[in-house]
Image (cartoon, rainbow, N blue to C red):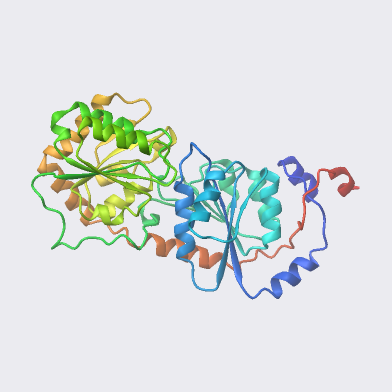
Amino acid sequence: MNHFRLLLAQGFMISTTTTKKWEKDEKHSLNKKVVFVVKGIKGKGLGHCFRAWTIAQSLPAGIDRTFILSPNSHLGVKFFKQKLEDNVALSDNDEDIINKIIEAKPKLVINDILNTEPGYIKTIKKMNIPVINFEDIGLGSIYADCVINAVYSDSGNHKVLFGKDYADIRKDFVKPTRENINKNPTVSDILISFGGEDPTNLTQKTLNIIAKNPKLSSFHYYIALGPSYQHQHNIEHFVKTKGIKATIIVNQDIAPLMAIVDMAITANCRTVFETAFMCLPTVVISANERECLHTFYREAMFPYCGNGQLVNDAIIENNILKLAYNADIRQSIVEKLFTMDLSKGMERIIGQISKFIGHTNGHQPLVTHHLTHNIEKELS
């Protein structure tokens, strides 16, 4: 089977080229470029966008970056525009992602779109472009040059870098020293944070539980709402009418908040690594079925509630009460977290990116400039 029929079988239709123009462009390129393909769809959260942007901020000087958003990722486009990123493009469809990658002529493609298909990865690899995927447990991950799955355990694939050693902790987080680590015997302040969008509205679910329990209502809460959270006014009204002692923080960095609270309640996402880095005891609630596959909370000894869309309120209530009113449990968690070194994750990620920039596999690229639906003409 020739290359074109192979890619057609994988779901992508491409045109032929002699590769000379591509080689010329690569040879005379002054700046290395990384393309981030990112998912930022309403209802799916903004974790992928946050990670891509965080990694981009840590890239060595002289490396250009372009963000290609998957179809319907209007929320992601808004996110990157708010971060003042210039090179941001929304894809019309899956084929358009490939078109935009071809136009960008990157040295490396980084996918943060969850599971990928083999045809998609193979098409990029046929252009002699190395590929790094994040949180990919799909069939396409087999064909990537490197897969970084900090939230998952070992998959048996030697190209997968897994576990907490690859947690992308932002430089804004400063781990407490042994001298200033939180040793408060009682809890006063609790952080509530469910990401940039909180699509399943775990913020409201948690506050409903707090409002019904006098013991939980006695604490002060910092409620961190992300830039795409849709229910801010409802939360403000609820807190006021129920008399909950709370400070509502909207679209602000939560790193400073983690340094002043006694414990946290978060989704089972990247935030769990951040609270662990800050040695902050945390109650963890998965926002969806996929987050239930994230298992770092076990190593961190964090009380875990299960899938927030299915779990009984009593389980969440009991876990918050147990952590808030048991100083011994909190101290054991803090001691455990203090022994963890999560500070090198971003350094390791950037090391992998640097390794692949400029990488070639010795094969001539077979794709350029545009895809075509007239595949029979290209094969004739």
Q: In the image shown, does 302 or 239 lie closer to the viewer?
A: 239
- Residue 9 left/right relative to 218: right
Vertical order, 352 against 235 (above or below): below
Q: In the image shown, does 347 or 102 lie closer to the viewer?
A: 102
Residue 127 visible in the displayed image: no
The number of discs equals 0
- Residue 179 left/right relative to 110: left
Query: Residue 299's spot in the image, x, y percent?
Result: 28, 45
- Residue 230 left/right relative to 105: left
Query: Residue 87's spot in the image, x, y percent?
Result: 59, 60
Identify the residue shown where x is 67% and y is 44%: 92
Query: Residue 351's spot in the image, x, y percent?
Result: 46, 66
Vertical order, 322 against 5 (above or below): above
Residue farthest along the left direction in this orientation: 185
Query: Residue 215's spot in the image, x, y percent?
Result: 13, 32
The image quadrant of residue 266 is top left
The image quadrant of residue 313 is top left
Q: In the image shown, does 362 or 259 lie closer to the viewer?
A: 259
Residue 104 visible in the displayed image: yes
Identify the residue shown where x is 65% and y is 47%: 91
Q: In the image shown, does 209 or 15 lie closer to the viewer?
A: 209
Vertical order, 343 against 114 (above or below): below
The image quadrant of residue 235 is top left
- Residue 96 left/right relative to 140: right
Vertical order, 229 against 251 (above or below): above
